[in-house]
Each structure stands twice: as C-alpha cells, then as structure tokens.
Amino acid sequence: MSEPLVLVSDQGAVRTFTLNRPQALNSFTAALHRELLAGLDAAAADATVRCVVLTGAGRGFCAGQDLNDEGMGQDGTPADVEGVVERHYKPLALRIRSMPVPVIAMVNGVAAGAGANIALGCDMVIAARSASFIQAFSKIGLVPDGGGTWLLPRLVGRARALGLAMTGDKLPAAEAAAMGMIWQCVDDAALLETTMALAQRLAGLSSKALAATRQVIDDAGGMDFDAALSLEARVQGAMSRGHDFAEGVAAFLQKRPAIFKDR
Ligand code: T3D
C-alpha cells in the first residue's frame, strides 16, 4: 500500500497534519490537496479537535505547486494554472481561514511559492531557524498566490511585500520573525516542543473566542475605526452569551483554571 500523502496524528486535542511528499519537498499535487482538505474538513467537524498544526515531512515544509503535476502543461496538455488555483489553493486557503479552531504552521524547512503563503495564512507561524520563506513565483513567471497578495502587505507592508515577491529571494526564518511576518523563530531542536506547547495552550482556551478573534481582526482591517468598534461590540455580545464567557469569569473569580467548551 502506498504511503498517505498527509500524515495525521492526535496529541490530546491537538491534531497535526504532516505533508508527506518529502522527495519533492512536500510540493502540492492535486491528490495531496484533496487529502489535506478532506482532513481539515474532518478536523473542523470533530468537536474533540481544538487546535490544528500543519507541518512537513523531511527537510522541507512545502515547495508550493508540484511543477510536474497535472495542469502544469508538462504532459503536453495546455497549462491550466487558473483552474489549479481556483480548484485547489483557494479552497485550501479559505478552509484554513475558516477553521473553528486555531491553526499553527510549524515550518520545519523551506516554504516556497504557495507553500510559503499557505503557511502565512495560518493563525500563528513558528519556524525552525534553518527554515526559510521564498516567494518563488516571479522566477517562473507567475504572481503570488495561495493568499500571498492579501497576506504579505498586511504582514510586512507594501515595500517588503513587493521586494520579496519581485526578487523571489530566500528570507531566513529569523529575518521573517524580525520583520513581523511570522510569530516566532526557534532553534531547530526546539521546534516541535515549542509548537506543541503553544498548541496545547491554545487548545485549552475558548475555540469559539479564538476563531472569532481571527475573524474580527481580519474584518476590521477593511473597516474604518467607527465600524470596527461596532463590530467589536456585536461580536462581544455574541461571545458573552456563550458558555465560555461565564466559565472564564467564574474561573477567574474562583481562582481556578477555566474549562472552556464552546467551539
Ligand atoms: O498551477 C499553479 O502553478 C498554480 C499554483 C502555483 C503556486 C506555486 O507554488 S508556484 C511556485 C512553485 N514552486 C517553486 O517554484 C519552487 C521550486 N523549488 C525550488 O525553487 C527549490 O526546490 C527550493 C528553493 C524550494 C529548495 O531548493 P533545494 O536546493 O533545497 O532543493 P531542490 O534540490 O531544488 O529540491 C529537492 C527535490 O524536490 C528535487 O527533486 P530531485 O532532483 O531530488 O528529484 C526538486 O526537483 C524537487 N522539488 C522541489 N520543488 C519542487 C520540486 N518538484 C516539483 N515541484 C516543485 N515545486
């Protein structure tokens, strides 16, 4: 039997997805997209999962689109890059962005092309010091995708977004952290432990509040201040009617750990 393209493992309430095509730096094929999306859908529907971690097998995180796969025009058929982006990258980026639980990218090695931008679309990114981020698109005559056009300028500003996208230069993880593109860069030996400790912490918080936090921060970015304040009020109203707000306040007042349930 052939190896799964995505390895799935659970540690308590944390579900880890490991892209598993190390021989091609975990670059995306249509089959890999299908397995990953199905896995994320299942995690979204499973109330026992309260945090998701995405990582890669071997020395790379993900080298973006597999340039030999279907739709790339290498088999003599016309390239269908637009179709590949619509059919695979858009649903994947939207799935990650709409997960009911936080999603952490544990970037173990090079993240290139759409591989970089799928990582950056996760809620928090922790990268090994040996890892790097490459907006490889300009080198093959494409523009950033996988959400990069939206994410990059928001994360690092227009000047750096354009510099990274136009040069396609390799950005070491430590520099990515220094410019605020990712949450943290840690020594390679500490990557797994640091990521899992964070994942377990997030899994113990209110999934509903964390998912709503992602939503309001993204939505407020496109609003004026007044509208953002109204959005905050509306969402706080909804949050405060849930179990977790009552539990959080009670736990604080009773000086005990809260047990959150909402998702
Ligand atoms: O339809 C669409 O195209 C739409 C979507 C586009 C989104 C995109 O992601 S476009 C960008 C696609 N990605 C790239 O252009 C990156 C290509 N890869 C590289 O530039 C380099 O591999 C890296 C800089 C990422 C890493 O370099 P290095 O020297 O550490 O490794 P390597 O030797 O280049 O790669 C190792 C193996 O992985 C190698 O195979 P081999 O020779 O050992 O059999 C290489 O061919 C393979 N590999 C790496 N990236 C890809 C790949 N095979 C297929 N597709 C890849 N993207």
Image (cartoon, grey):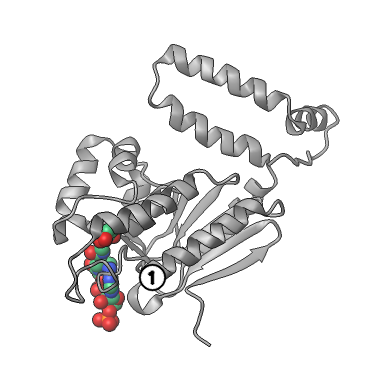
Q: Residues within 10 Å of mark 1 (few under 14, many from 20)?
A: many
User: Relative to residue 5, is residue 61 depicted above or below?
Assistant: above
Query: What residue occupies the far top of the structure in this picture?
Result: 226
Quarter of the figure that contains the C terminus: top right
Q: Which residue is drawn at 49% across and 49% down?
A: 95
Whether residue 88 appears in this view of the structure is yes
Query: What residue occupies the far right of the structure in this picture?
Result: 254
Where residue 9 appears, as percent x and y from the top left, is 62, 68
User: Relative to residue 219, is residue 21 depicted above or below?
Assistant: below
Q: Residue at x 39, y 73 (%)?
A: 59
Q: Which residue is denoted by mark 1 in the rendering?
A: 26
Q: Name the amino acid type tagged 1.
A: Asn
Q: Residue at x 47, y 30 (%)?
A: 217
Whether residue 134 appears in this view of the structure is no
Of residues 155 and 237, the one nearer the viewer is 237
Residue 228 relative to residue 240: left or right:
left
Where residue 123 appears, as percent x and y from the top left, is 49, 45
Whereabouts is ligand 1, in terms of quadrant?
Answer: bottom left
Where residue 29 appears, as percent x and y from the top left, is 36, 69
Of residues 186 and 66, the one nearer the viewer is 66
Where residue 126 appears, as percent x and y from the top left, is 46, 54
Query: What residue occupies the far bottom of the structure in this picture?
Result: 1
